[in-house]
Image: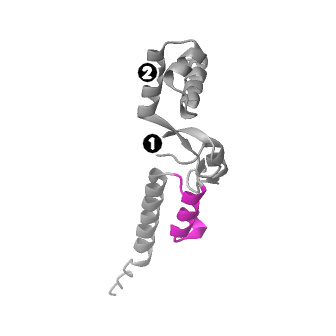
Amino acid sequence: MNPSTQVRVTEINWLFAEGLRPTQIADRMGISRQRVHQIIGSVSRTRKLTPCHKCGTLFLAERGRVVCDTCRSKMLTTFKCTFCSKERTILTSAYKTRLKRNRNPAKGLLCSKSCHMSVRWENKRQYADNKKLYNKEPNEKRLP
């Protein structure tokens, strides 16, 4: 869908959300009433105009989102993975939850499951190497 069509579709949805009938929208936009019904129907199946829970403005919500993009951008936090050094942006609530669950704050936060598993295997290898060092049996004494 090209940008001009997206603008037109958004405008039609705004007019419909404000309470205009499809025939009134069709007259205003210069298209057929059936086309207005198609546009409203296609959007209402996937996205709905809903008010934002934070600021109250109307936005096209997808998959149960309750906050508009401007409010959502204010709710994001960026952190750096301690294993791979990638920067990752997540919701602030998820970031705080990760901080609470983190048992060892000195290790920091990890960006993905693969980094988490890599750290676990690295720790297991270090543990096994240390165990080998400390559990070596003393050399047997040689008889004269």
Residue 46 seen from this side:
yes
Determine which residue is flagged by label 2. Answer: 38
Q: Is residue 107 magenta?
A: yes
Q: Give the residue drawn at x 43%, y 67%.
A: 129
Determine which residue is flagged by label 1. Answer: 63
Q: Residue furthest left?
A: 143
x then y, percent, for residue 58: 59, 40
Up/down of 63 relative to 1, above or below: below
Type of residue at label 2? Gln
Type of residue at label 1? Arg
Q: Give the residue drawn at x 53%, y 17%.
A: 26
The crowding category of the residue bearing disc 1, from other C-alpha atoms within 10 Å (few below 14, some 14 to 19, many at least 20), is: few
Q: Give the residues drawn in magenta, as a range.
A: 92-111
Query: Quick one: 132 or 59, which is closer to the camera?
Result: 59
Badge 2 element: helix
- The chief SS type of the magenta part is helix
x then y, percent, for residue 48: 49, 37
Query: Quick one: 139 or 73, which is closer to the camera?
Result: 73
Q: Is residue 143 magenta?
A: no
Left or right? Give the position of 118 relative to 95: left
Please state, as top left, top right, bottom left or bottom right, where the C terminus lies in the image: bottom left
Q: Are marks 2 and 1 in contact (CB under 8 Å)?
A: no
Q: CA distance from mark 2 to mark 1?
A: 21 Å
Up/down of 34 relative to 130, above or below: above
The crowding category of the residue bearing disc 2, from other C-alpha atoms within 10 Å (few below 14, some 14 to 19, many at least 20), is: few
